[in-house]
Image (cartoon, helix red, strand yellow):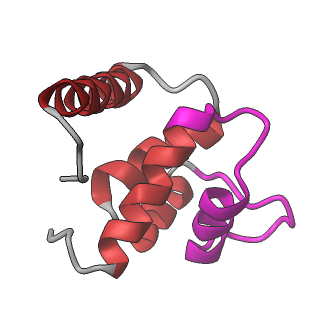
Amino acid sequence: MKPYSDIDELIEMLTSEIESLTNKITTLKQEPQSFNEQILFKYIDTGSTGKTKDFVRSLGVKAERGSFFSSGDVSKLIKDGADDVSPELLDIARKVVSMKKKGGMHR
C-alpha cells in the first residue's frame, strides 16, 4: 500500500484501485474485436508465448512475413502493440509479462 496522509486520502486511493480493477475486469469480459486481440486474450489466458503460438498455428494463420507464427511474434505484438488492439487489453498483457518475469504466475 502506498503512503497516505489521512483516512480521506486512503479512501481515495482505494476507490481508485477499485475503479482500475473494475475496468480491467470489464476489458477481460469483452469479446476480441480483432485477430490480434484474440492472440492477446489467449496469451493472458495461458501466460505462455509458446502455447499462444501453438494456438495461432492451429488456426493455420501465418505471420506477416509468410512463415509460421512464432513465440517471438507473440512477444513483438505485446511489446509493440497494434492498431487493432485496445490499449487496456495491451496493458493487461504487458502486466502478465511483468508478473511472469517476477515469478508470480504459475501454470
Q: Position of residue 33 (x, y in %)?
A: 59, 22
Name which quarter of the figure residue 56 lies in.
Answer: bottom right
Q: Position of residue 70 (x, y in %)?
A: 61, 73
Determine whether 100 is above or below 23 in the image.
Answer: below
Residue at screen point 23% across, 42% down = 5
Q: Left or right: 64 with respect to 43?
A: right
Name which quarter of the figure residue 99 lies in.
Answer: bottom left
Q: Left or right: 84 with respect to 52?
A: right
Between residue 42 and residue 66, name the one nearer to us.
42
Between residue 99 and residue 9, name the one nearer to us.
9
Quadrant in which the C terminus appears = bottom left
Residue 58 seen from this side: yes
Residue at screen point 75% across, 45% down = 82
Q: Position of residue 74 (x, y in %)?
A: 59, 64
Q: Left or right: 41 with respect to 9?
A: right
Q: Which residues are magenta?
A: 60-88
Residue at screen point 41% across, 57% down = 95
Count of labels in the image: 0
Determine whether 94 is above or below 98 in the image.
Answer: above
Q: Position of residue 8 (x, y in %)?
A: 19, 24
**Residue at far right of view:** 65
Residue 48 seen from this side: no
Residue at screen point 87% across, 66% down = 65
Between residue 65 and residue 28, name the one nearer to us.
28
